[in-house]
Amino acid sequence: MRIIRACHDLGIRAVAVFSDADRGALHVRLADEAYPIGPAAPRESYLAIGKLVAVARRAECDAVHPGYGFLAENADFADAVRDAGLVFVGPPGEVQRRLGEKTQARRLARDAGVPVADGTLAPLRDLDEARREAKRIGYPVMLKAAAGGGGKGMRVVGSAAELDAAWRLSSGEAAGAFGSEALFVEKLIEHARHVEMQILADAHGGAVWLGERDCSIQRRNQKLIEESPGPSVDDALRDRLGDAALRIVRSAGYVNAGTVEFLVDERGSFSFLEVNTRLQVEHPLTELVTGLDIVALQLRIAAGEPLPFAQGDVRCRGAAIELRVTAEDAPRGFVPATGRIALLREPAGPGVRVDSGLFEGLAVTSDYDPLLMKVIAHGVDRNEALARARRAVRETIVAGLPTSLAFHAHVLDEPDFVAGRYDSGYVATHWPPRTPAKLDESQITAAALVAVLAARRRATHRPVASPDGAWSRAGREEALR
């Protein structure tokens, strides 16, 4: 939906695809055209390159935006789009191979003079090699997917006894998420912060960084809360990170938007982590503090335009915090949850942005990532952003299944987070709270009652047929069948 909106702002028609599980999704309704591409299983729909390219050609598209996940960092997909005579909104396939494959990216960063953590510089051939390399590096280590990011296929391995099980789990998860079970191993940097630099590069030699995002609040190596600027990043460290990011970008011949990620230790030293050769889920933070539309800039760069500004023109104002509201039972260890949204109230007001595809009656399944909505709060400084984030959480109601809202309510008031004292191990040491979070019982009771009434009304309500022409855009009839 975010990408469709940027297209519409630029006067560009948007074509969407959907699996059987997403037939009723809002992005299907928002697009100018929408086409079915197969069953819920990603390999038969969202990872099926041939189907996606066929739809793009059938709909007479000019370009393909790969979104955030699935094939967004797949060089073969970028090549297939190009070979079909279409523009890929992102770095070309050869650049994705240099950076999207994590071990090649580590070698490139090292050759560009950027610090890299000790680890393998090629995918591991088998479990025996993983054992040898982990022993050489010294436990604890991180086992990671070579073909993708987003926390998929990633495991902390504390000892040799844990490696066999971690290998099986990580390789299977990597194969399901990225179509490749290749793994690599690197030294775990304990008590590190996860800090990333947003970059933009055009095809004319222009490249800039747009400030950092601290993404250290994670569970299972997947992000839950991000903020910009990072509370531990001063101007000197920011400049060093920006310089390192651009060295990697220029060495790779990068074009379009991307993110260069680093681990920053307690002393302020950093090491290269990876490059996400795509738009990040947390890009709204950077948009709010810079005032730039990153998706629109992606489209303009893909159309061959140069960046409309230089590094010295980039100005960051205020602070922003993003909360990823997920379909997970946070008190029970973030167990994935399913259900139907019986009642929805999204937050609003000054300084609050919501990126969401939710609506009442939506069935939340276990087919894909549990992310439901992103709530982003912006203020003149971190204190105001925190206050607005707290307000937004209090206003939000997603009834019908467990969500991570209780986690966010707790963290936003937790002293270490409020003081900016946290690292990537924060969730393990601060959640669940010793004292259960205090919830507004009257609000919960009212929400539950309204949810029940709404569910009953939907069960007995007979929908009114749309008038002819309401869904008459090209491709719409087929999309809704």
Image: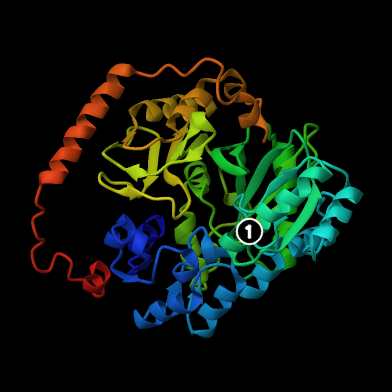
Q: Kindly state the secondary structure of the residue where label 1 is placed.
A: helix
Near-viewer residue (342 or 311): 342
Instruction: Report whether 24 appears left or right of 389.
Output: left
Give me the residue at 61% from left, 42% from top.
Answer: 220
Q: Is residue 474 above or below residue 68?
A: below
In this figure, which residue is indicated by the disc labeled 1? 172
Q: Is residue 102 above or below residue 337?
A: below
Residue 380 visible (yes or no): no
- Quadrant, the N terminus: bottom left
Q: Label 1 sits on what residue type?
A: Gly
Instruction: Report whether 338 appears left or right of 324.
Output: left
Give me the residue at 55% from left, 57% from top.
Answer: 309
Crowding at dot 1, Cα within 10 Å, few <14 / some 14-19 / many 20+, comes out as some
- Quadrant, the C terminus: bottom left
Residue 459, located in which quarter of the rendered image?
Answer: top left
Residue 352, located in which quarter of the rendered image?
Answer: top left
Near-viewer residue (160 or 240): 160
Instruction: Report whether 395 appears left or right of 169.
Output: left
Q: Position of residue 256 (x, y in %)?
A: 57, 64
Q: Position of residue 98 (x, y in %)?
A: 71, 68
Q: Position of residue 359 (x, y in %)?
A: 28, 46
